[in-house]
């Protein structure tokens, strides 16, 4: 990998100027939008972008518009210096770290809204569609500022990635969207910026989330569940045993998020739960085709 020197940019005109200059020199641009608190999942996205592009922009912007609770926004972990250092080590060339008024100037009055099952179910049902309106609006703004060839998102936020693909297609934003696999700790816990707020006991309890997803996936692939409800029950049972009452535990079509009516094709199993006062989400995809599942083992 070529050695990269990271540049920190805080304003939109500077960001546009820098990208225009790099493009004039023939560079391609990869983009990883983040809210900071970078972990190995973000770094994997940055590394991938760095292996595919000359310039890698990482935005670090905690977007107030996508938080449904003020205390969640307040407690979101912040350490810009550590984030810039980690992004640089992973191969970022530019860290875009605007302040809130740079993104939302005083007279800001617009919103990007995706409507339908994609935003109204799962996270949308629990947090309200306003969460996705806030996310879609800021991602549109960031894509417009950065003008990347490819933008990278993590599969842990599967619903977010689907919503991004929807508005990028609908609004004809000229960027390719890549969704990269969820990065997990060795014991299965999906990496999340929020994990930093878990106590040791809370982290132990949180392991039940990935275990429950796996229990439901196993019940589907080994045939012990004969319906989505039965697979769901296998997952919920695992959560209950760990003392977790999920906000949702759902088996859905991975491209529409409609609830699965039968066990066939590829299915998304998604869960959200608050553990130790920290709201966590995770998901898995599983093939309900038993021959394929066996062949993949
Ligand atoms: O996934 C996130 O961290 C955020 O939703 C994103 C895409 C950076 C937009 O604020």
Image (cartoon, rainbow, N blue to C red):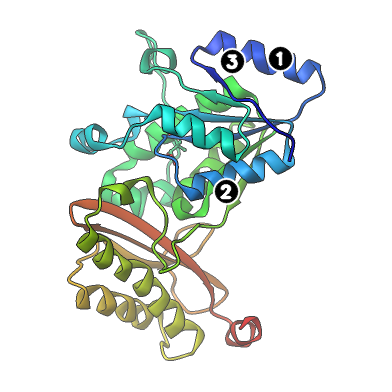
Foreground tag (2 vs 3): 2
Q: Compared to 188, does 112 lie above or below?
A: above
In the image, is 139 to the left or to the right of 210? right
Tell me which residue sits at (18%, 56%) in the image: 276
Tell me which residue sits at (37%, 29%) in the image: 63
Foreground tag (1 vs 2): 2
Residue 222 position within the rendered picture, expressed as x and y whole percent measured from the top left: 49, 89
Secondary element at image label 2: helix
Tell me which residue sits at (67%, 30%) in the image: 4
Instruction: Please give the label number shown on residue 20.
Output: 1
Look at mark 3 in the image and give the residue it sits on.
15
In the image, is 206 to the left or to the right of 148? left
Tell me which residue sits at (51%, 29%) in the image: 59
Residues marked 3 and 1 touching at CB (< 8 Å): no
Residues marked 1 and 2 touching at CB (< 8 Å): no
In this view, the residue in front, 120 or 88, is 88
Residue 95 position within the rendered picture, expressed as x and y whole percent measured from the top left: 54, 25
Position of the C terminus, as image quadrant, is bottom right
Q: Compared to 123, does 230 lie above or below?
A: below
Look at mark 2 in the image and give the residue it sits on.
44
């Amino acid at each position: 990998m070529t050695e990269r020197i990271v540049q920190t940019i805080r304003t939109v005109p500077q960001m546009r100027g820098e990208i225009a200059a790099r493009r004039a020199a023939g560079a391609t641009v990869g983009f990883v939008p983040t809210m900071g608190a970078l972990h190995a999942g973000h770094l994997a996205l940055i590394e991938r972008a760095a292996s595919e592009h000359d310039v890698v922009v990482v935005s670090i912007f905690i977007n107030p518009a996508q938080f449904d609770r003020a205390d969640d926004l307040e407690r979101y972990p912040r350490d810009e210096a550590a984030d810039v250092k980690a992004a640089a080590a992973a191969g970022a060339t530019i860290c875009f770290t605007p302040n809130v008024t740079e993104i939302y100037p005083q007279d800001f009055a617009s919103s990007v809204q995706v409507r339908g099952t994609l935003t109204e179910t799962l996270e949308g049902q629990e947090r309200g569609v306003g969460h996705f309106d806030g996310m879609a609006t800021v991602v549109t703004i960031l894509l417009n500022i950065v003008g990347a060839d490819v933008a990278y998102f993590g599969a842990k936020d599967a619903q977010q990635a689907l919503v991004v693909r929807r508005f990028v297609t609908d609004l004809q934003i000229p960027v390719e969207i890549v969704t990269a696999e969820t990065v997990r700790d060795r014991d299965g816990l999906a990496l999340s910026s929020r994990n930093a707020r878990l106590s040791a006991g809370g982290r132990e309890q949180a392991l039940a989330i990935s275990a429950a997803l796996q229990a439901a996936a196993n019940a589907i692939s080994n045939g012990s569940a004969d319906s989505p409800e039965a697979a769901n029950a296998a997952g919920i049972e695992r959560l209950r045993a760990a003392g977790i009452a999920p906000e949702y535990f759902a088996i859905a079509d991975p491209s529409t998020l409609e609830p699965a009516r039968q066990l066939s094709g590829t299915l998304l199993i998604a869960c959200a739960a608050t553990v130790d006062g920290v709201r966590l989400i995770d998901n898995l995809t599983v093939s309900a085709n038993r021959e394929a599942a066996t062949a993949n083992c």
